[in-house]
Image: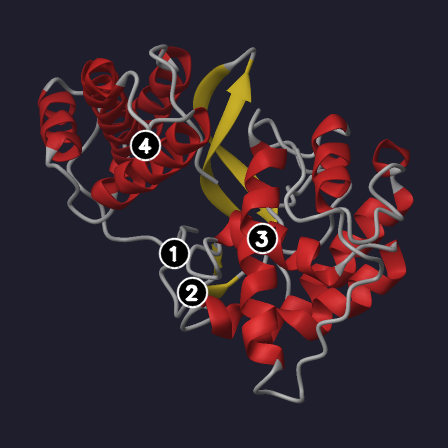
Amino acid sequence: MTAPINTSFDFAGLASLRNDAAKTQDTTALKEAAKQFESLFTQMMLKSMREANRSFSEGSMLSSSQGDFYQDMFDDQIAIELSKGRGLGLADVLVRQLAQSGTAAPPAPAQNVSAVNDHQPLASSKEDFVKKMWPHAQRAGQALGVDPSALVAQAALETGWGRAVPSHTGGSSFNLFGIKAGSGWEGATANVPTLEFEQGVAVRKVARFRAYVSPADSFNDYARLIGNNPRYENVRGAGGDVATFASALQEGGYATDPNYAQKIVAVADEVRALTNNQASSDDSLKFASLSPTNGGSGGLRRF
């Protein structure tokens, strides 16, 4: 998931990856560190540009804190997209410089490592994502006493509407809720670069996530996690109140992003709009909420 980047870099994390590269004589860790640095640099650059121009919009009718929030989300996504593939070229320069200094050996043959989105997306569009995930969300929502649209919204936020699902052995991990693989997890896993917040500072890490055989398996595991963990007691039974659902998730420590609940509410509004449009033309979609909404939108630890 994306989140605003502060001006503090995770130098300890980057140094750790560089040390790993030196010890293993493999450039995989070095390339990962370089890509993370490039992404952080891009986000800082965009943030600085926005701050520099913000003074010109003071007093404007089009300027608002809500607008700034969505602008930050958009900038975060731009930074991620710009860092994919060859990116801006900064990562390649860093790899060459550090390799010349003896930090890592010449590039080794490609290994079968986990990544994000090196497989076909789970859906071709937002509408397609909602349609495919809805039956699973209905079953999980019924078990938890939560509106299915809230669960689809959370899955959409975690995976970029099915386009950024962690990979596992060349295919999808079907991890729709960003659930990490703790010490008690005995199933398959996927190693994925992620962004965590530690004391308000954004930190890039590589974490182990659970891997599933299907979207249904992912929803079932999510329902077990939320249903059995006392930390999420207030999540259960939230009905159609997405704001309560999202706030309870964040208060329970589901994610470290300070804006996680607000983002779920915003995406849920979009999910509901999509479901209302599709319901009128597709009888297979049953978009019934568990309880009436409260008037629309209210107000990475995952284990």
Q: Please, which colouring scheme is shown?
A: secondary structure
**Residue at x 31%, y 30% (from the top left corner):** 36
**Residue at x 12%, y 17% (from the top left corner):** 101
Q: Earlier in the sequence, mark 1 or mark 2?
A: 1
Q: Are marks 1 and 2 in contact (CB under 8 Å)?
A: yes
Q: Are marks 3 and 1 in contact (CB under 8 Å)?
A: no
Q: Choose between 205 and 135: the one closer to the eye.
A: 135
Query: How far apart are the alpha carbons under marks 3 and 1?
Result: 39 Å
**Would you name the residue on which mark 1 appears?**
112
Task: Give percent across and percent down for residue 166.
Answer: 48, 53
Q: Earlier in the sequence, mark 4 or mark 1?
A: 4
Tell whether 200 sits left or right of 217. left
Instruction: Please say whether residue 42 is visible from this viewpoint.
Output: yes
**Would you name the residue on which mark 2 appears?**
170
Which three-letter amino acid code belongs to the residue tagged 3?
Answer: Asp
Q: Are marks 2 and 3 in contact (CB under 8 Å)?
A: no
Q: Earlier in the sequence, mark 2 or mark 3?
A: 2
Judge depth for marks 3 and 1 and give the one in front: 3
SS for callout 2: loop
Query: How far apart are the alpha carbons under marks 1 and 2?
Result: 8 Å
**Would you name the residue on which mark 4 appears?**
62
Q: Are marks 2 and 4 in contact (CB under 8 Å)?
A: no
Query: How far apart are the alpha carbons under marks 2 and 3?
Result: 33 Å
Which three-letter amino acid code belongs to the residue tagged 2?
Answer: Gly
Q: Earlier in the sequence, mark 3 or mark 1?
A: 1
Q: Choose between 139 and 99: the one closer to the eye.
A: 139
